[in-house]
Amino acid sequence: MGSPSAELNVLESARPWYQNGLQYVFKDALPELEQLENPPVRQRTAMPAQTQAAAQSRARAGEVPPVQHRVPPQRSSGSPAQQQGFQQPTPAPKPLRIPEKRKAHQTENICYPDPDSWPSPWSTLASRITPRLQIFWTYAQLGQDLSGQADPARRKLFQSLIGYMGLPKGAISFWPCTASNGGEFEQHPEMFWKGVKSYGVKFVACFGDQTRAILAPDAPANAASVHVDGVQLVMLQDPDFLKTLPPDEQQLLCISLLRLPLF
């Protein structure tokens, strides 16, 4: 019947026929049975001579050849410079830019005179002065406007210029250098400078050549500004001329007021 191990390669569907001896009857009709009985012998790949000699030497010595495990390559998430062994230095953290706290505006404790101590029309204006005062505005026609004979065009002009300056309320105050006396207007430069000293004013907006002649008669006629006893007088156009101009031209001729270091 052949070797018993030959039945290991027999198909289960053909095993009953095989065990009953039909492999000899149908051997010519079923050549596949001979292949089942004699399966092909697998040939081992010849090892190189040096490798085979080394393996035999280790076998005689009782050494077990180490098992080499192939480690799959790992993907690197770093940059090409880091993959080549270069490390970029870690940048130092930037300092936090914390804005400085604004210092609250400290108002000097100035002992202002009693408003009733001033004659009219200065007393009316003195009652409105606050510690925010930074600059006096004056013009020769101011005595007339404070006497009840105000010019609406001049009032509109100065309202527009004050809005153009954008200063806090109370930073600007009018202070006259003239006054009405029974229909006549008198010049009073001494009262004007007394108010400048009493309220600690350092800047004066002087509108018109007539006003300049009252307050600083020695100043050049074409001077843009003059200093009198540490006070800066900014020379500007006469209000009766400015009121005839469009608002943008009025502001352009008074732009020097924006350059003053107020506050």
Image (cartoon, helix red, strand yellow):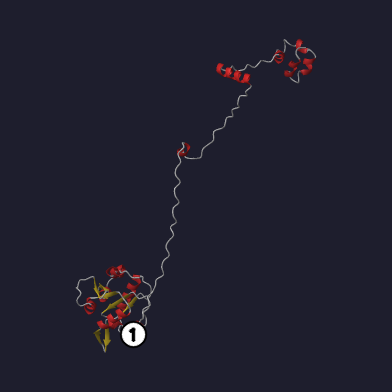
Q: Which residue is pictured at 33% across the width and 85% down the height?
A: 123
**Element under label 1?**
helix
Q: Quadrant of residue 220?
A: bottom left
Task: Give the x, y percent position of residue 247.
Answer: 31, 70
The residue type indicated by label 1 comes to: Ser
Q: Nearer the viewer, residue 67 or 29?
A: 67
**Along the line of sight, which residue is nearer the eye, 25 or 81?**
81
Q: Dot 1, crowdedness within 10 Å: few (<14), some or many (≥20)?
A: some
Q: Which residue is label 1 attached to?
A: 123
Q: Quadrant of the N terminus?
A: top right
- The image shows residue 43 at horizontal and vertical percentages of 63, 16
Say whether residue 10 is left or right of residue 179: right
Outermost residue toward the right in this view: 20
Within the image, what quadrant is residue 39 found in?
top right
Farthest front residue in view: 61
Residue 162 position within the rendered picture, expressed as x and y whole percent measured from the top left:
34, 73
Camera-side residue of 132 and 149 = 132
User: How many tags in the picture?
Assistant: 1
Q: Residue at x 24, y 85 (%)?
A: 186
In which image quadrant can residue 63 be found? top right
Q: Residue furthest bottom?
A: 182
Q: Nearer the viewer, residue 4 or 199?
A: 199
Question: Where 253 sits versus 16, above or below?
Answer: below
In this rendering, is residue 157 above or below 41? below
Q: Could you tell me which quadrant the C terminus lies in?
A: bottom left
